[in-house]
Amino acid sequence: MLTILGFAMIATFLVLIMLKKMSPIAALVLIPALFCVFVGKGAKLGDYVIDGITGLAPTAAMLMFAIVYFGVMIDVGLFDPVVRGILKFCKADPLRIVIGTAVLAAIVSLDGDGSTTFMITVSAMYPLYKRLKMSLVVMTGVAAMANGVMNTLPWGGPTARAATALKVDAGDIFVPMIPALAMGLLFVFALAYVLGRRERKRLGVLTLDEVLEEETETVLVGAGAGKDTKKAGGSGSGADLPDEPEDKSLQVLDPNRATLRPGLYWFNALLTVALLTAMIMEWLPIPVLFLLGAALALTVNFPHMPDQKARIAAHAENVLNVSGMVFAAAVFTGVLQGTGMVDHMAKWLVDNIPDGMGPHMAFVTGVLSIPLTYFMSNDGFYFGVLPVLAEAGQAHGVSAVEIARASIVGQPLHMSSPLVPAVYVLVGMAKVEFGDHTRFVVKWAALTSLVVLGAGILFGII
C-alpha cells in the first residue's frame, strides 16, 4: 500500500505542477501533507517537516547568499568588461560571434539565473546576428546549451535540489564533477566553432564598422521580458511574455547606471576568484563562503545602509523563490522518508531492475536524467524520482552522492525544456519560434549531456 501511495503522491505532484495547476512551492507542501494523512501518520507531520528543515537549512543559506553575491557583482559591473571584450573579439566574423555567444552565456551563467543569462546574452549579441543575417536559432541553441552546463553550479538549482533530496553536501556533488562538466562545456565551444564555420561559409565576413552602423537600431530586444516572464505559459513561442517595463538587461549593460563601482573593479574580481577558489579547494563549507562573500561585497561596494537595503531588495524576489522552494521541499522529502514510502518504492524498483543493472544505477540515473528532466521540471525529477533511484542504488552498493552526480548530466537539454520559464525569455527576446529552437537544439543538447555522462564515467566520477 505504501508503494502505491508513494507513486501516487509523486504522480499527483508531477501532474499538478506540469499542468500549472499549483506552484511548485504549494505542491511541495500541500500534496505530501495530504498523503501523510492518507497514510495515517498525520500526527507526525510536524516531526517530519522539522527534521527535513534541519537538514536543508545549509542548502537554503547557500542559495540565498549566492544569489545576493552574484546579483551584486552584476550590479557593480564586474561582468561589463567581459561583455565588451567579447563584442570586440567577435568583430563581424560569424565564427567568432557564435563562439562569443557560448563564452558570454557561460560566464554570465555564474549568477545561477537562466533568465538573467539569456537577457544579457541576447541583448549583447542580437544586433550582430541581426545585422549579419545570421541564424538566430544558432544563438538561442548555443546560449541554452552553455547555460545548461553551467546550471549545474551549486547555486544554480539542480545540484542544490539533488543535495536537498538526498541529504548530501552540494560540494561533494559538484566539485568532483568539474572535469566532466568542463568536457561538456568544451564540447559546447567546439560545437559553436562548427556552427560558426557553417555560418561564416554561408555569409562571409563584414567589417565591424558596417555592423555598428545598425547596432543602434536596438540594444535591448523585447525589453519587457523581465522577471515576470516566469509566468509565461508553454504555448511554444514568446508571444505570452508580459509587457512588464523592466529593462533588467539594459540596466546590467548601461554604462551609466548608479550601481557601478569602477574604482572597486579589481577588488570585486579578486574577491570572486578567491571565493570560487575557496569553494573548489573546500576551505570552508559553501554556505559559509557565500555568506561571508555576500556580506563583504555589500559592505565594501555599498557602505551606506540605504544602498545595501536597496540591493538586497532588488534581489529579494529570486532569493525568496529559491529558498522558499528548498524549505517547502522539506515537507515533501520529510514525508516521503518519514512515512517509509520511499523505502517501499525503492524495494519495488530494486525488485524490478535486472540484477545485472543494479551495480550500474549511477549510469542508469544519468541516462534517465536526460529525457526525464526535459519532460518534467527539476522539482519533479529531483524531489520525486531521484530519491527512489538513490534508494535503489544504495541497495546495490552505489552511494547516494554518485547517484546525485549522475542526476545533473541532463541539464544541457533541460534548459530548453518547455517547462523552463527562462527559455521563453530566450526565444522571446531573440524573436525565435519555440518550435524552431526545439528542432535545432534537442539533438545537440542531448549529445552534450551524453558527453558529460561519458566523461564522468571515463574519469571515474560516476
Image (spheres, helix red, strand yellow):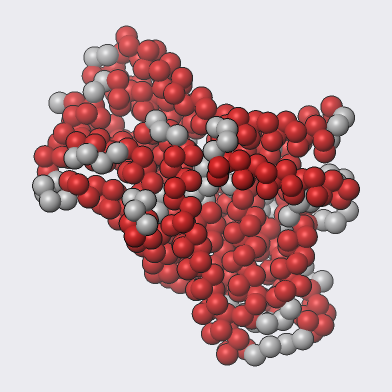
Which quadrant does the N terminus fall into? top left
Left or right: where 444 falls relative to 364? right
Q: In the image, what residue occupies the spot 19% across and 26% down?
A: 2
Which of 150/214 is in front?
Answer: 150
Q: In the image, what residue occupies the spot 37% across and 57% down?
A: 459
The answer to whether residue 132 is above or below residue 243 is: below
Left or right: where 426 falls relative to 34? right
Q: Can the viewer see residue 453 in this picture?
A: no
The answer to whether residue 224 is above or below residue 8 is: below
Indicate the quadrant where residue 89 lies: bottom right
The answer to whether residue 259 is above or below residue 455 is: above
Which of 11/293 is in front?
Answer: 293
Q: In the image, what residue occupies the spot 60% across and 74% down?
A: 98
Percent x, y of residue 222: 68, 60
Q: Can the viewer see residue 278 in this picture?
A: yes
Indicate the quadrant where residue 117 lies: bottom right
Percent x, y of residue 183: 46, 63
Q: In the image, what residue occupies the spot 71% across and 65% down?
A: 124
Percent x, y of residue 56: 47, 26
**Count of numbered labels shown in the rendering:** 0
